[in-house]
Amino acid sequence: MKANKSSLLILVALVLGIIVGYACNQAAPTPEAAKEIAGYFGIVTDIFLRLIKMIIAPLVFATLVSGLANIGDSKTVGRIGTKALGWFIAASLASLLIGLVFANLLQPGHALNMPLPEAGTATNLKTGALNLKDFITQVFPKSIVEAMAGNSVLQILVFSVFFGLALGNLHSQAARSLVQTMDEVVHVMLKVTDYVMRFAPLGVFAAVAAVVTTQGVGMLAVFGKLLASFYLALLVLWVVLIGAGYMVLGKEVFRLIKLVRSPMLLGFSTASSESAYPKLMEQLEKFGVQNRVTGFVLPLGYSFNLDGSMLYTGFAALFVAQAYGIPMSLGEQVTMLLVLMISSKGVAGVPRSSLVVVAAVLPMFHLPEAGLLLIMGIDHFLDMGRTATNVLGNAIATTAVAKWENAIDPVDPRLDDVDEALPVADGAVPAEATA
């Protein structure tokens, strides 16, 4: 099946989800009935996301260990990691700046003139998860089994680095056999991913239908200015990211965008970065990125390089200030930008992490945390855009680092749109190019 067909099926599922969700919303006699109907759609969505989560931990572990074992050099790992983190920091700063600039220019919350909420109004967000001590300690797993059970990507990454480097520095026949076994595990996990992704259109349909059934489409008109402003800022961020990619990759960046449109659409439809991870990994291999780079940089990016989420945090914080008529000086905004820059790195695994970051930072600048209640109703639609942007940002970052490392193998572009096995390059792991 061609990749174009896969993208088309996901897009059709998205449109059908909106239509069916709207019909159910109109047919439901009460909001409670709408929630009950949405619950049935939610069963399908939960099953699909569970299948995705099922493959995340073994896929990250196998690819990272395989890649590092084939590198076998801790200095190379340090060099790749330094380049990746440098890109992540620069991209995060650019994302935050764009969010603040567009929030100031477009003033999406200016006309709301909301009264300040009562002090006890709660958002039910776990802001306690946002502190430096817990972040630093939770990076390091106390049990790899527990880390895998919880899909804690950063903890899996730490264990995999130690395991992969140790395996790469052993030169016995048994160690080489284990490396080959890990290479085959990657191949198997990508085949499992192919099977799971065949259910993607069904999962997308159910996810969108559930949200529209409960929220309706009228809410899009009510918060149209916020949505339009946010997506315009995302568009500018896309231009910046693609421009940065062009400086490193040249015209090949457009081929990369063509390849990653399917995982971006999947992430957009489900509002889940996890759902796009396996597919993104396969598309990067289609582009020619060697597995040793993808297996290391991509999991790292999922914890530290969330460009769309970074833009959202600054944008949402200023929206709350505007909605309640609370002025913020340029100095306060710059300070908030730096605080958000640091804070956002510690909550990648926290549910609704972007909202958690904003809710925790707002009180530092005397802004009502409960102001987030204004946007929680449409947060899913905002999350769709920032998730797709996260996928794009990580695709470009991984490919840029691979380019700097001379770790992009020549591949036949004619294989971009077909499900055929890619040629095996030295140090790379064979995988099937799935739609």
Image: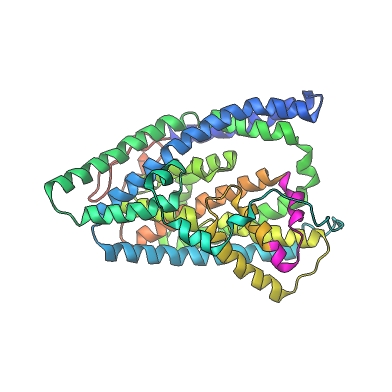
Identify the residue at horizontal 45%, vertical 57% (top origin).
139
x then y, percent, for residue 160: 33, 51
| In the foreground, 313 or 87 | 313
x then y, percent, for residue 57: 41, 43
Q: Residue reaching furthest front?
A: 142
Identify the residue at horizontal 36%, vertical 58% (top origin).
402
x then y, percent, for residue 309: 59, 55
Q: Which residues fall within the magenta stretch?
A: 362-377
Secondary structure that dominates the magenta span: helix
Identify the residue at horizontal 71%, vertical 44% (top origin).
378
Residue 343 lies in magenta, yes or no? no
| In the foreground, 93 or 321 | 321
Answer left or right for 6 relative to 419: right
Answer left or right for 213 relative to 388: right
State whether residue 160 appears in this view: yes
State whether residue 410 appears in this view: no
Q: Residue reaching furthest bottom?
A: 331
Identify the residue at horizontal 27%, vertical 63% (top origin).
74
Q: Quadrant of the C terminus?
A: top left
| In the foreground, 429 or 283 | 429
Q: How is the image coloured?
A: rainbow
Answer left or right for 246 relative to 35: left
x then y, percent, for residue 142: 40, 52
